[in-house]
Amino acid sequence: MAAAICCPSGLAAASSGRQQPSPLRPSSFCGSSVASCSYRPQLSLRCQSRRQSRHAQSVVYASIKAPWEGAPPARLVLEDGSVWHGTAFGHTGTEVGEVVFNTSLTGYQEILTDPSYKGQFVCFTYPHIGNVGINPEDMESEKVHLGGVIVRDLSCKVSNYRANITLDEYLKQQKVMGIAGVDTRAITRRLRVTGCLNGAICTDPSVSDEELVARTKSWTIVGKDLIKEVTCTEPYEWADPTGEEWEFAEQAKSRNGAPPLRVVAYDYGIKHNILRRLTSFGCKVTVVPADFPAEKVLDMNPDGVFFSNGPGDPSAVPYAVENAKKILGKKPVFGICMGHQVLGQAFGGKTFKLKFGHHGGNHPLRHTPTGRIEISSQNHNFAVDTATLPPEVEVSLINLNDGTCAGMYHPGLRAMTVQSHPEASPGPHDSDVAFTEWIEMVKAEAAASKA
């Protein structure tokens, strides 16, 4: 039996005395399968033909211009002196900002248009960016607010039926710089070790690396009030809920025509989907500028007051803290992200800057009253110092990555906060329950006032 296995098939058939079955293919078969070439010269000719075909294809491919060819070169220079060379997309020139990394796998358009990124460059850890283009439905504000985009691979093609423009074209319109072809993994590791670094994106070869390093060292986000650069200028009404095809919360679907709750929302850089979530849960929302006097808010006699997300250093906006102090205890309040930090200061606490911040859609939180675990979307570089909070403030959410405060509850003042972005744009829906909890608080307060 061993001899039959090792011998050619014809010899094996002779030794066994059994006739082998006829080939499945007719003798006239002219396919390209190597298995069908039983005659050595025929096999040689076919292999030669294949080599010639591959060579012809390689000549054609060599004549096609690569998508990145012709793109102007760009540099990312960090304040530690490191230089990263790539290709430019979007706007050209020189821009300085704080470099942060974002670990979200999807939702780059929502990140681009999130006002909370004002003054920052976003380094995307997900390597392929631009593949779904840009569409008007997924905007979180009217324009791009971040200062620069850093990606490993800028997608050459857009594959999304909702898209109407490429990322490159959109950033050109918005006059925002981008750099592609750099090692975003290495940049992220550097930021995790050293902390956030200022950086400069530059397409001008006449500007030296040393000059760019000097510019980054002379720039800082600490102590800057960036809220006034992104807030609205006049109050306005918002009435657009989450689209029916996107609605996922049963509480929002089952309002059954209940009368709307009147909510005043402070705009520190508020995102459209936060306003949509409030509206979906039955709120009639009036948005006011960041420095709108608390007295005028109370004159509106709302059922609740909302403090939104926003960019910059929370300790640099004392006017927002003073307004919050005047409203606390008079109306139920809810703060998200910057609003969480503003209310933390209004409670009597302090804030501090994190080493490299929280930016992404995969941050685990523990809800301390119930033990519930949430995977949250976050975008902030500052946090509330729990050691400085008065004892009556309950820390309702803990970030499980580093133990920082991710939510607060003050029962006496009917106030709650979350550090995450519970509207999930982009990100998971786990923290959307925060809207439900606050709406129940506002309803209870409204019912008690009418009793």
Image (tube, rainbow, N blue to C red):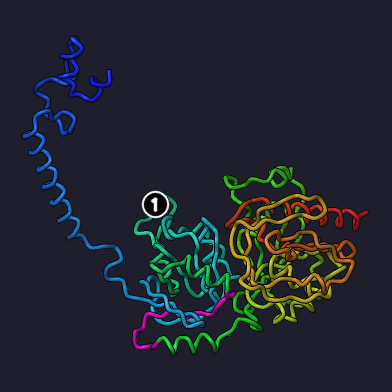
**x and y, in percent, of residue 39 in the image:** 8, 29
Residue at image position (82%, 66%) is 301
Above or below residue 3? Residue 405 is below
Q: Split into 4 quadrants, where in the image is the N terminus?
A: top left
**x and y, in percent, of residue 425 in the image:** 59, 57
Of 303 and 351, nearer the camera is 351
Residue 176, by quadrant, is bottom left
Of 94 and 300, nearer the camera is 94
What SS does tag 1 mark? loop
Is residue 358 on the magenta stretch? Answer: no
Residue at image position (48%, 73%) is 148
Above or below residue 403? Residue 95 is below
Residue 445 in view, yes or no:
yes
Q: Which class describes the residues within 10 Å of circle 1: few (<14), some (14-19), or many (20+)?
A: few
Residue at image position (15%, 56%) is 59
Residue 326 in view, yes or no:
no
**x and y, in percent, of residue 13 in the image:** 18, 15
> In the rendered image, which residue does mark 1 sit on?
159
- The number of discs equals 1
**x and y, in percent, of residue 346 in the image:** 81, 74
Residue 194, by quadrant, is bottom right
Residue type, mark 1 in image: Ser
Is residue 199 on the magenta stretch? Answer: yes
Q: What is the magenta range?
A: 194-208
